Amino acid sequence: MPFAELELQTQLLQRLTELKYLQPSSIQQQAIPVILAGKDVLAGAQTGTGKTAAFALPILQQLLNQVEPAAPHPAAPQSGSTQALILVPTRELSQQVSQSVESYAKLTPIKTVSVYGGVAIKAQIEAIKRGADIIVATPGRLLDLVRQQVLSLSDINYLVLDEADRMLDMGFRDEIIDILKRLPKTRQTCLFSATLDDRIFKFSKRLLQSPHVIEASERNTTAAKIVERVYNVDASKKLPLLCHLIKKEDWQQALVFSRTKQGADKLAKQMVQAGVNAAAFHADLSQAVRETVLEQFKSGEVKALVATDVAARGLDINELHYVVNVELPFQNEDYIHRIGRTGRAGKEGQAITLLSVDDEPQLIKLEAFLDRRLPQQWYSGFEPDLSQVAPVTRKTKKGSLKQQARQKALAKSAKKQC
């Protein structure tokens, strides 16, 4: 199916041709007609599936439809009247989504402004005053602007929550509810989430009216083009193995995940000492530093970006072939988010997990969550010391963990039968 069959306006189709967008992805095929029909949408779509275009294109189309057809040079909707709001969890995602929307709208007069914390608010205020038809925002900075009466939400006709699961994980629930109170009750709302679980369905009831549910992939699954490997290795050998992989296999870029900001700093420093050009990427760094590090990573100057889950959410890096979990995440959902940084838009990627005996309890929980086993292997020269045994506590006993996993599976099965 070509984009032309989705009945988008000429300016948008021409721009998609310039961008070499040949055919809509699955989420785009499913979501665009529904959003154009004015219906609320609850969509499960992983990063890299084209979800930004799935909500941005129909919103742009509807804004363009408001322009009077007889006008020789269509003008944007009334300046100063923001009609579309896209909420995102992080600064990086705000920039990324805003850049994408601006790109799609290049041949139209529609203006997009990105607002997020961590930088001076003055420039964002000036941008809004110049006119913003679409605002892409993180919740906290948006509320700051509303409370300062720089921005009104009274004319919002279109609301999108992108990566809603991550916004809840980051504790934005209260801010989102505050924002909802300031929006018109009559509006079109779209909620996009990498995972559609009970928490998201429950939360969506506050936002959506008779939504059309779209699942671009099965729940708790990863992209088919991602090859997952788990290397059993001693904790003390994780760093040497990681550096060996980058050097020996000549990786041009690797996104490496650490659970904590302190851990990311330490690992990046150790990698540099081992001869790998690495840099940390987390929320304690200033926005200017983060942007510089990200540009260095994209250009290849930095080979390994050591990131935390929160900071990495929203990263859009073309041709990223390798993601490495130096340790498994605390939240099982984050495993899907992490490895979703690679294997984007149908391209192949590798997701490698370095597993020591201390990580085994978390692996059992993760496999129960994924409902499948992750293939484990040894890497020649870095074989684990089999005499090492993970510390056992009441909460980490294998039998206990398996029982927890079984109970969850039974509960899930019973729910399906209801």
Image: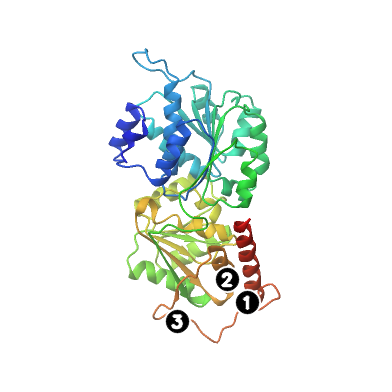
Please report the residue visible at 52 percent of the width from the left and 85 percent of the height from the top.
386
- The residue that mark 3 highlights is 383
Q: Amino acid at mark 3?
A: Glu
Marks counted in the figure total 3
Residue at (61, 51) in percent of width and height: 169
Q: Is residue 56 above or below residue 64?
A: below
Q: Which mark is residue 364?
A: 2
Q: Residues within 10 Å of mark 1 (few under 14, many from 20)?
A: some
In the image, 258 versus 266, the foreground residue is 258
Q: Position of residue 340 (x, y in %)?
A: 45, 55
> The N terminus appears in which quarter of the rendering?
top left
Q: Image point 56% across, 77% down: which residue?
A: 357
Camera-side mark, 3 or 1: 1
Query: In this view of the protein, can residue 57 be seen by the observer?
Result: yes
Q: Amino acid at mark 2?
A: Ile
Mark 1–mark 2 CB contact (< 8 Å): yes
Q: Is residue 10 left or right of residue 324?
A: left
Disc on res. 398:
1
Q: Quadrant of residue 13?
A: top left
Query: Mark 3 or mark 2: which is in front?
Result: 2
Q: Secondary structure at mark 1?
A: helix
